[in-house]
């Protein structure tokens, strides 16, 4: 299974040059301000990409997905696109779980307080998860801001270490784009934009 991972396209998806693959994963922030028009534009583009499977989660910019009832969201998602929100899907034997929440970050969408408030989301992640999609990073892993602060989630890191997914894919911290392997878990910050919201990072490719 050839997988392509991206994150933080912020409405700039048309600038991407996607490599060929079987599955396209997006770790949130598909829009700039989360308006319905932005979301529709992204979904139209996403659904047209030449991948057998297209899966995404929302991010802290994507207010539409937090403010709209589930029925309204479901009506908007194209038939060939999978949207995950504290939920999972099995694709050709690969179990993928996705959650949009991150530790409180100003007044953006899907904020949760650190500790028990956010951990209740992480405890939903099944132990058989192969690929974990979150918008925010775990603590201390590809989460360092330009100010030198590690802003990832401690509780997320604990849960990842418990369940040992093969891949943990996220974005959110644009300047921390990259990949690292720890304890046989491959971590990917797939943000395609930099701090200035310029598309500078290529999509990440891997096989599972």
Image: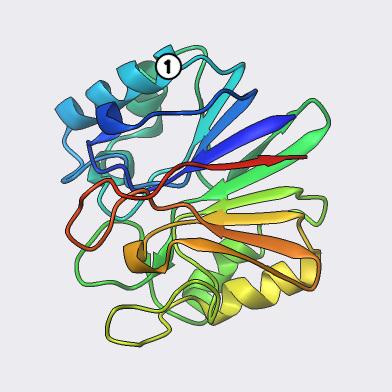
Q: Residue placed at 36% from the left, 66% from the top?
A: 173
Q: Residue placed at 31% from the left, 42% from the top?
A: 9
The location of residue 58, given as percent across then percent down, is 39, 44
Res 105 quadrant in image: bottom left
Mark 1 crowd level (few <14, some 14–19, many ≥20, 10 Å Cα): some
Quadrant showing the N terminus: top right
Looking at the image, is 94 positioned above or below residue 63?
A: above
The location of residue 128, given as percent across then percent down, is 82, 50
Looking at the image, is 47 positioned above or below residue 161?
A: above
Q: Residue furthest bottom?
A: 148
The location of residue 80, given as percent across then percent down, is 52, 14
| Disc 1 secondary structure class | helix
Q: Residue placed at 43% from the left, 44% from the top?
A: 202
Residue receiving disc 1: 47
| Residue nearest the viewer, comparing 197 with 58 | 197
Q: Residue placed at 81% from the left, 66% from the top?
A: 184
For the question of whether residue 49 can be seen, the reply is: yes
Looking at the image, is 189 positioned above or below residue 72?
A: below
The location of residue 191, given as percent across then percent down, is 40, 53
Viewed as shown, does residue 80 lie left or right of 34?
right
Q: How is the image coloured?
A: rainbow
Viewed as shown, does residue 174 lie left or right of 134?
left
For the question of whether residue 83 can be seen, the reply is: no
| Residue nearest the viewer, comparing 164 with 191 | 191
Quadrant showing the C terminus: top right
What is the tally of numbered marks visible in this picture?
Answer: 1
Res 104 quadrant in image: bottom left
């Amino acid at each position: 299974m050839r997988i392509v991972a991206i994150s933080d396209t912020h409405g700039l998806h048309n600038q991407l040059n996607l490599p060929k693959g079987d599955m396209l994963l997006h770790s949130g922030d598909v829009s700039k301000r989360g308006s319905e028009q932005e979301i529709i534009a992204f979904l139209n583009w996403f659904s047209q990409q030449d991948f057998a499977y297209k899966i995404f989660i929302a991010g802290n910019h994507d207010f539409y997905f937090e403010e709209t009832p589930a029925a309204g969201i479901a009506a908007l998602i194209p038939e060939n696109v999978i949207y995950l929100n504290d939920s999972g899907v099995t694709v050709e034997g690969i179990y993928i779980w996705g959650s949009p929440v991150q530790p409180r970050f100003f007044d953006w969408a899907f904020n949760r307080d650190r500790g028990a408030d956010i951990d209740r989301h992480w405890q939903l992640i099944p132990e058989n998860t192969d690929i974990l999609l979150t918008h925010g990073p775990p603590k201390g892993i590809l989460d360092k801001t330009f100010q030198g602060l590690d802003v990832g989630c401690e509780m997320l890191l604990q849960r990842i270490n418990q369940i040992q997914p093969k891949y943990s894919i996220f974005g959110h911290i644009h300047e921390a784009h990259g990949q690292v392997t720890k304890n046989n878990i491959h971590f990917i910050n797939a943000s395609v934009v930099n701090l200035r919201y310029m598309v500078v990072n290529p999509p990440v490719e891997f096989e599972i």
